[in-house]
Amino acid sequence: MSSEFSLAKEIEKVLAKNRGATDDEEQEAVDSCDSISENDEFEYDEECGEEEEEEVVEISENEMLALLDAERDPFEVCSQIFDKEKLFGDEHPEGEIIVSPNLTIKHLRELHQKGFVVIDNFIETEEANEIYSLTKRIAHTFKPACELKKSIEDSCDDKFRDNLARSDLIKWLHPKDFTTNDNSSSSYCSHCTDNEEDIILWKNNHTLRNIVLNKFKVIQQRLHEFAPCIKREDEGMELMWSLYRETGTFYEKHRDSFPSNGKDEGPLDQRKVTALLYLNTEWVDENDGGMLRVFVKPENHSKHTERITKEINPIACRLVLFLSGAVDHEVLKSFKDRVALTSWFS
Ligand SMILES: O=C(O)CCC(=O)C(=O)O
Ligand SMILES: [Fe+2]
């Protein structure tokens, strides 16, 4: 998760509320935490300001999310990124295509309402097949995600990271990898140790270039139109290429960011929408594993914290979009090599 905001204040506010504090007491607690630095994100003094008998509360990302969720429905917060007039107005009919060939206004409306949406046949099977084969060919250049930065922006030495939470291999990409003629390791991919031959293989691949520049970049631009807090520039976009080996590779339940409406609620500079494009032309059925399990709200939910699970098969050419700050998700053990391109729009 990106954390460019004073999480300490946010935490203290939630905890103060949890302790049953009044609004004034809550503000006092927040004010007295002004000196907490961002590096202290998940470790802070419950009685801010009291020197003696400091009781340090350690809180994990998941515990923090549970506290925030108890306060406010994350789906409600995150869906506010959209300009509702634009999304539901007559100006854009349901069938209007947002990103060719088949991402429509209807899908964005579903993303707003349910928090996630699945779009099949977003690329051609031949394209998926080509990238799937390419991934296996240069698999030796992918690195264990748990050893790398959590995102392009994050610092590497994140002491809160749970290295056992995931076992996938990844490579960071960037649109600039495909718009410059430089055949060196990507500057956005500081961990890359590819030799020049391998780099040429993926940087000069027209299909990959097309997916990055004419799919993911266009999704970003179009999302910005309907959710103006999402950046239009490449800087607000992270692009990850992942490989889950067939040996039971997994990613435990997690959330990609803290809930934010991009305006006045939650940390503003967070991932807002996650986009996943699956390239698994060899995936047959559930026995191959690797399903994406999402924890979403039931249709007529009475309690806002209620969740149901849905399993999404990672079939080739399937695009999945979800609200990064609302949808908990996990990748079930994979028994066939599983390839995806994932992007986060902030
Ligand atoms: O590949 C997937 O289906 C999800 C991966 C994921 O959750 C992540 O990388 O944050
Ligand atoms: Fe994720």
Image (cartoon, rainbow, N blue to C red):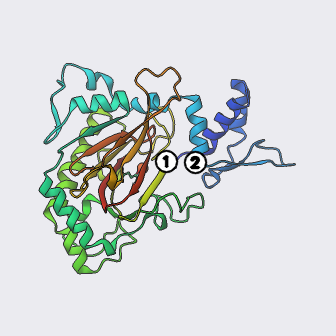
Secondary structure beneath dot 1 equals: strand
x, y percent for residue 157: 55, 65
The quarter of the displayed image where residue 71 is located: top right
x, y percent for residue 207: 15, 60
Quadrant assignment for the C terminus? top left
| 10 Å crowding of disc 1: few (<14), some (14-19), many (20+) | some
Secondary structure beneath dot 2 equals: helix
Contact flag, marks 1 and 2 (Cβ < 8 Å): yes
Looking at the image, which residue sits at the far front?
A: 287
Q: Is residue 121 left or right of residue 48?
A: left
Q: CA distance from mark 1 to mark 2?
A: 9 Å
Residue 254 disc label: 1
Residue drawn at x 36%, y 40% is: 322
Q: Is residue 130 left or right of residue 79?
A: left
Residue 331 disc label: none
Tag 2 or tag 1, which sits nearer the N-term? 2
Residue drawn at x 17%, y 24% is: 93
Front-most of residues 15 and 321: 321
Residue drawn at x 35%, y 60% is: 335
Can you tell me whether the CB of the residue at mark 1 lies under 8 Å from the nearest atom of ligand 2? yes
x, y percent for residue 191: 40, 71
The quarter of the displayed image where residue 30 is located: top right
Front-most of residues 326 and 78: 326
x, y percent for residue 62: 57, 45
- Mark 2 = which residue? 61
